[in-house]
Amino acid sequence: MQPVWGWFRWLYDTTGINLTIFYDAFDRSRFASGFWTTVRLSLICIGASIAIGILGALIQTTRLRVARAVVDGYVQAFRNTPPLVQLYFFFFGLNAVLGTLPSRPSLSNVVWAIVSLSLFAGAFNVEIFRSGIEAVPRNTIEAAESLGFSRLQTYFRVVFPLAFRISLPALNNNLVNLVKTTTLAYAIAVPEMLYVSSQIWSDELNVTAMMNVLLICYFFLVGVLVFAMDRLERALKVPGFGA
């Protein structure tokens, strides 16, 4: 790879395009670390937010009014407040309160970013899955019940598989927004891609070059997610349900 790194050094010397993340080993290693931190943060938040969405949608279909009210309150709170404010609440507010407890649990800024972003995206996923469940025809549910399925069996074997297919297009949009929202973790010093890029352009004064690199990297990450979700939609497609 040395000839490749050398070419970027030559590019800088001849054109002034200063991409130190390629020809400088230190900048290259910290940008790579930030990139993989963004990938890990995105994957964990995607998985957690989907789990929250499924659980919340299940609770909303139960007859437990108090549980439904709690979920509805959670959805309204997280959908109607800015994600950056939520991030600050968890990191500076709740984290400080937990620090006064006798056990004093120590949670890192990365953990708080995962908690905040997962709950934020999960609130939207609850509504996405709930709307998918409501779109399943009533006669399908009645057919499952006539075969002797219990309420939980009907939900997990019939209703939710169909609802998941119906929900995929909206879920895709929300997960794309979640990946882009991970940049907010910059605000609490999580060493993700935007954070390390700001360090690099502060040291090297190559703001324009690094902004273009960031744009390309996020375009790539979102493109991979959209491609994977599109393949999943095609694989799970059922005539008459979903896209």
Image: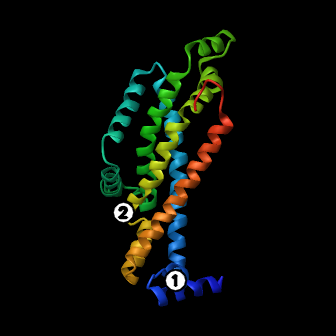
Name above or below for residue 109 compared with residue 200. above
Q: Is residue 99 left or right of residue 196?
A: left
Position of residue 233 measured from the top left corner of the image (x, y, whole percent): 62, 38
Q: Earlier in the sequence, mark 2 or mark 1?
A: 1
Circle 1 packing at 10 Å, graded few (<14), some (14-19), many (20+), is: few
Circle 2 packing at 10 Å, graded few (<14), some (14-19), many (20+), is: some
Q: Is residue 63 left or right of residue 47?
A: left
Position of residue 46 measured from the top left corner of the image (x, y, whole percent): 52, 48
Question: What kind of element bears circle 1?
Answer: helix
- Quarter of the figure with the N terminus: bottom right
Tell which of 180 and 38 is nearer to you.
180
User: Which residue carries the number 1 mark?
Assistant: 26
Task: Specify whether residue 108 is in view.
Answer: no
Question: What kind of element bears circle 2?
Answer: helix
Q: Residue at x 37, y 82 (%)?
A: 205
Task: Specify whether residue 240 is in view.
Answer: yes
On residue 188, the disc is 2
Tell which of 151 and 15 is nearer to you.
15
- Between the residue at mark 2 and the residue at mark 1, the CA separation in whole angstroms equals 23 Å
Q: Residue at x 52, y 66 (%)?
A: 35
Disc 1 marks a residue whose amino acid type is: Phe
- Quarter of the figure with the C terminus: top right
Q: Is residue 208 left or right of residue 10?
A: left
Tell which of 149 and 171 is nearer to you.
171
Q: Is residue 176 left or right of residue 93?
A: right
Q: Are marks 2 and 1 in contact (CB under 8 Å)?
A: no
Q: Residue at x 44, y 32 (%)?
A: 127
Tell which of 55 and 14 is nearer to you.
14
Name above or below for residue 68 compared with residue 224. above
